[in-house]
Image: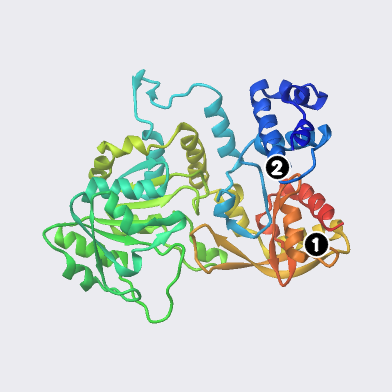
Amino acid sequence: MSNRYRGLPSVDLVLAQEPIRELVQEYSHDAVTRLIRQQIAERRATLSGDGSAPTMDAVVEAVIHMAKMSWHAWPRPVINATGVVLHTNLGRAPLSADAVAAMTVAARGYSDLELELESGERSSRQAYVASLLCQLTGAEAALVVNNNASAVALGLAAIAQNKEVVVSRGEAVEIGGGFRIPDVLLQSGAQLVEVGTTNRTYVSDYETAISEEAGALLKVHASNFRVVGFTHVPAISDLVVLGAKRGIPVLNDLGSGCLLETTEFGLAHEPTVQEGVAAGCDLLFFSGDKLLGGPQAGIVVGKKDLVNRLERHPLARAVRIDKLGLAALTATLLHYLKDEATSTIPIWMMIASSGDKLKRRAARWKRAIGSDASLVQGESAIGGGSLPGETLPTWLVALSAANTTGGAEALAARLRRSDQPVMARIQDDLVVLDPRTVLPEEERVLVRMAKGAVE
């Protein structure tokens, strides 16, 4: 046993190898040494099970592989060829060129984040972005935090702590990451009062449930699921009338934050923020990185007195948005004010892409990839907790897995593990690539990765 252990190279000998010396120059002596010790320990465990001692080259190769896998920049860029426009696992909405540039400028140096340049006095980081949001939505006031879950939690804590919040049983839901409306209510100090049934709730159900302890009526938009058939939900305007009658604020969690009319793109109607404001909601909550097409953010718009209460709440400091998010969000909102969202914001460019344009792109890819590729029709999904069940017609490039051991799953894995990872989807035992969600500047790389995967 001891002879086998003596066959293991020492840490110093491994450090002396040329590829490892280069690794030390790129990183640090201590970091590389830790990897070497880890690799030798793993090989020692193998030897205790009657394995054979590794060669020096094998240890060096393993250390370099570990460094490559452990120390690359992250998150890594991925080409989204799945056709899912808002892909949560891939970071949801890609930003516009202007939003990326704004983040770069904000990160590179100092800024007037909390300074009023005219007077030289301290100001609020919320002032400018709030003004843009009010202009776009018609709201009296606005507030931005780090994500929509935070926005809802802050709103409930500021408005309904130690009070009852009435919500439809069909809207006491869970969204991605285990985020549950009942749990948020509990953490905010509010008490959940469920009314109605899973599929049918009426205004009268809310009214019956209102007690002296009622702090708010809460409506949660079904942004990531759909109940069909024998259903009924009250219009938000009816809840606003009830809230005004009983002196109780109406809070509306819209989720996706849509500012455009989705029916113009062949999709079902998605309630817009402007509609919620016009209906008289006291507070509306929505995300920045879903149908708004900007960075991760939680946005609150509504009545000024209530927004001010949220701003003054201690939790507001804990969930505030950073300067990079504000820069990207501001640039995104300006696209809407310029009426150029469908030509500059990537997700709206994708949603607005015509069938003819998608077919031309897919045909170009097919020709470049070769005989292993074919053209088929398919559907793109919106995804990301927006417009559940809604799809858009598209054209796909289907890659044959006939020559790939392991079939379509193995071919899709090859694409994911490419030098430039490509996320595809499997349909009818074929690996398909959807041009709708591939940015124009990614096309050449995508074709190269696809050709390499099928060869």
Tell me if residue 368 comes above or below residue 420 in the rendering.
below
Frontmost residue, 323 versus 22: 22
Q: Can residue 311 be seen in this snapshot?
A: yes
Residue 273 placement, left or right of 389: left
Frontmost residue, 360 versus 212: 212
x then y, percent, for residue 80: 66, 53
Helix, strand or loop for disc 1 = helix
The residue carrying pointer 1 sits among few (fewer than 14), some (14 to 19) or many (20 or more) residues within 10 Å by Cα, namely: some
Name the residue at 66% across, 34% down. 38
Identify the amino acid type marked 1.
Ala
Tell me if residue 215 comes above or below residue 194 in the rendering.
above
Disc 1 or disc 2, which is closer to the eye? Answer: 2
Identify the amino acid type marked 2.
Ser
> Do labels 1 and 2 touch, CB within 8 Å?
no
Name the residue at 72% across, 70% down. 377
* Residue holding disc 1: 363
Helix, strand or loop for disc 2 = loop
Name the residue at 64% across, 26% down. 31
* Residue holding disc 2: 48
x then y, percent, for residue 23: 74, 26
Label count reads: 2
Furthest residue toward bottom: 230
Name the residue at 35% across, 76% down. 199
Report, in whole angstroms, how far the alpha carbon at label 1 lies from the one at label 2: 57 Å
Which quarter of the rendering shows the C terminus?
bottom right
